[in-house]
Image (spheres, grey):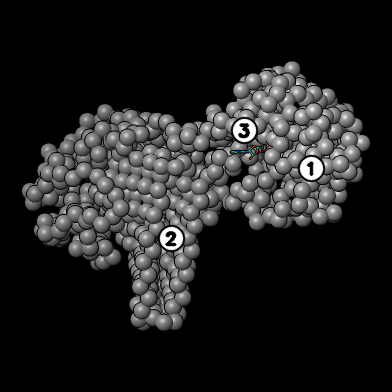
Amino acid sequence: MLEVKNLKASIVGKEILSGLNLSVAAGEVHAIMGPNGSGKSTLAQVIAGQTDYEVTDGSVEFLGKDLLELETEERAREGIFLGFQYPVEIPGVNNAYLLKAAVNAKRKHHGLSEIDAFEFLKLAREKMAMLGMDQSFLNRGVNEGFSGGEKKRNEILQMAMLEPLLAILDETDSGLDIDALKAVANGVNSLRDPERAIVLVTHYQRLLDYIEPDYVHVLSGGRIVRSGDKSLALELEERGYEWVREAANA
Amino acid sequence: MSTDPNDLESLVNRRYEHGFVTDIESETLPPGLNEDVIRAISARKKEPEFMLDWRLKAYRHWLTLQEPEWAHVHYPQIDYQDISYFSAPKSDDDRPKSLDEVDPKLLETYEKLGIPLHERARLAGVAVDAVFDSVSVATTFKDKLHDAGVIFCPFSEAVIKHPDLVKKYLGSVVPHRDNFFAALNSAVFTDGSFVYIPKGVRCPMELSTYFRINAANTGQFERTLIVAEEGSHVSYLEGCTAPMRDENQLHAAVVELVAMKDAEIKYSTVQNWYPGDENGKGGIYNFVTKRGDCRGDNSRISWTQVETGSAITWKYPSCILRGENSVGEFYSVAVTNNMQQADTGTKMIHIGKNSSSTIVSKGISAGRAQQSYRGLVKVMPQADGARNHTQCDSLLIGKNCGAHTFPYMEVKNPSAKVEHEATTSRISENQLFYCRQRGISEEDAVNMIVNGFCKEVFKELPMEFAVEAQALLNVSLEGAVG
Ligand SMILES: Nc1ncnc2c1ncn2[C@@H]1O[C@H](COP(=O)(O)OP(=O)(O)O)[C@@H](O)[C@H]1O
Ligand SMILES: [Mg+2]
């Protein structure tokens, strides 16, 4: 589904990703771990199409298409979802309004009719119940005044409504208390599907207790330096990132 | 489309949709201003003597005044002798009695403006008094209004048919001495609307006027007077668009509102005059004096405006809250883009006991536009228990535009409560990226954010116009990002 080959990307002239390879197939859950500043968010943002980053080499294919040729919104409509590490506040814009616009933009792209208000509300309420979110969030400004945990739940709500083919969740677990973490994990697990791939960016193994990954990768120095199954996450927790860094340099 | 931050500056490439000129031959006075020109205007309009005297008095006063320079706007010197003060479509002498008799070219113009007079009037139940250049051409729904006892007619008609009402109220809110532009308007105004709602009458429909500037190099000086007698109620909408032009066009309207005891006037404006090209060339200069007088107890006047047009706007719709418990409201959305300059705001003068006012001003700037909010809240010594709440928000799109806020407060009564809140925010790249990552195009994202920012004001507009105003805003900011 997703093929990242020899990806090099820089920001303000500074190289962050230096030849990254990653292959994700439908139905899989991948976890990407790594120390702060190793380029995890950069990878997520480049896949989503954030143009502050300059791709200097390599390729990214999604379902056989050259992703780097597509605009951000086109990538999204094709089925790529990014759960932001820091979801931005958009005061004055109704949360439900944004959500509905997003759902309809995608439906339109796929030649479907717009979802009607009744259908939309029904669906949104279902998903919110699953995530333990109060209905009142629908009528608030997008992320406006939300706590850290509320913002993350809101990201998962959007994901659940948009039903992406590839969901990249950038540290969706950080800053969550245990209840929120469980709710988020619940939301993610409910989307697990043979047609869908999920990439979890995290630096704690804690999340992986609730969402079991098929693969774990360690990112360091702008490259994936080690890949394995979920036992790698446990090993990492035990031995720390120094261990992979040394391994990478060796 | 890219979200490179540098691209934020490459704002707005939209061409003004309504920029065309209809070539109906105009019967236009040669440029220049003197007493003979004023006599000629008055004669052509077959005005009674009192009107001519009033004009001349205003003109003589205007000669003693200096053009104001204090506003936060810049424009080349206006040569008042280079403006033609009267123009009428040829068919003026033979006024059409119904739409069928209206020059088809003119109807076509309305069509292009998206104002299918026929349909619009019939479907929406709106009476339209359309002003083409300086003379009203078509007036509809007269009968229904007549039955209710409402007078809604071109100002020039009111001068002839209802001279007593005109004499009594004209200049009673905005005297000819009020300011430079008001004095000029008083001397040379050609037409506008006159509305009179008798005691206890709730006007059965929204009253609406579409203004349009057409003949080249012709100043446009409308005069509007709305009088709501005791316990009456009226909602009035003014909207306008203008054709593309190379010379700057001066517009100096005066609007006077009078609300007697328990009366309510809601005055809504959707303004879309040609703002000039990307370099500010050719736009309308809009210097307007709008004032409402809450003369009676418990009276209420609301100004709601959505302004996207004009090269320069200088405008402060105001309320004089004379009556006890009278209420003044000002809800405004002003958009300035490219080289547009706007210095707008409101004045709330509290005289009556327990009078209250609300000001909600939403300013949106993009391109290299400059926008200033200038608001005065004045509480006179006798206005016990007066209250004001002002909310003044600015939204910036891009890095080269500016927003300035000048709140003035003069409170001379210690029991008054005056509150002022102001915010400035900028549409950020992060917000746009976030929306785009959800599949929403950049343009839709900007519209969404802008409409969210303005919704407090939009909800004050009459329903059928709120949608229109929102669409207008979207069009005005098209291409404002990326
Ligand atoms: N806008 C920026 N300007 C300069 N450096 C940046 C910018 N954004 C990220 N970086 C740098 O890129 C590196 C990788 O950041 P990031 O991808 O956010 O790491 P991670 O998500 O793994 O913690 C860090 O060194 C960070 O400082
Ligand atoms: Mg990160």
Residues tagged by mark 2 and mark 1 found on one chain of the structure = no
Residue B409 is left or right of residue B94, and the answer is right
Task: Please give the label number shown on residue A50.
Answer: 3
Label 2, residues with CA under 10 Å away: few <14, some 14-19, many ≥20: many
Q: Is residue B310 in view?
A: no
Q: Are marks 3 and 2 on the same chain?
A: no
Say which of marks 2 and 1 sits in front.
Answer: 1
Q: Residue type at mark 2: give it.
A: Phe
Q: Chain of mark 1?
A: A
- What kind of residue is marked 3? Gln
Locate the C terminus of chain A by quadrant.
top right
Q: Is mark 1 within 8 Å of ligand 1?
A: yes
Mark 3 vs mark 2, foreground winner is 3
Does B326 sit above or below residue B344?
A: below
The residue identified by callout 1 is: A203
Which residue is disc 2 drawn over? B330
User: Residue sitting at 62 percent across and 49 percent down?
Assistant: A89
Marks 2/1 in contact by CB < 8 Å: the verdict is no
Local secondary structure at mark 2 = strand
Is the CB–ligand 1 distance for label 3 below 8 Å? no
Residue A9 lies, with reference to residue A156, above or below; the image says: above
Residue at image location 44% in from the left, 39% down from the top: B476
Distance from label 2 to label 1 (Cα)? Answer: 52 Å
Residue B361 is left or right of residue B139, and the answer is: right
The image quarter containing residue B225 is bottom left
B232 or B341: which is nearer to us?
B341
Residue A150: image x %, image y %?
74, 53
Question: In the rendered structure, the residue with mark 3 lies on which chain?
Answer: A
- Residue with the most extreme top position: A64
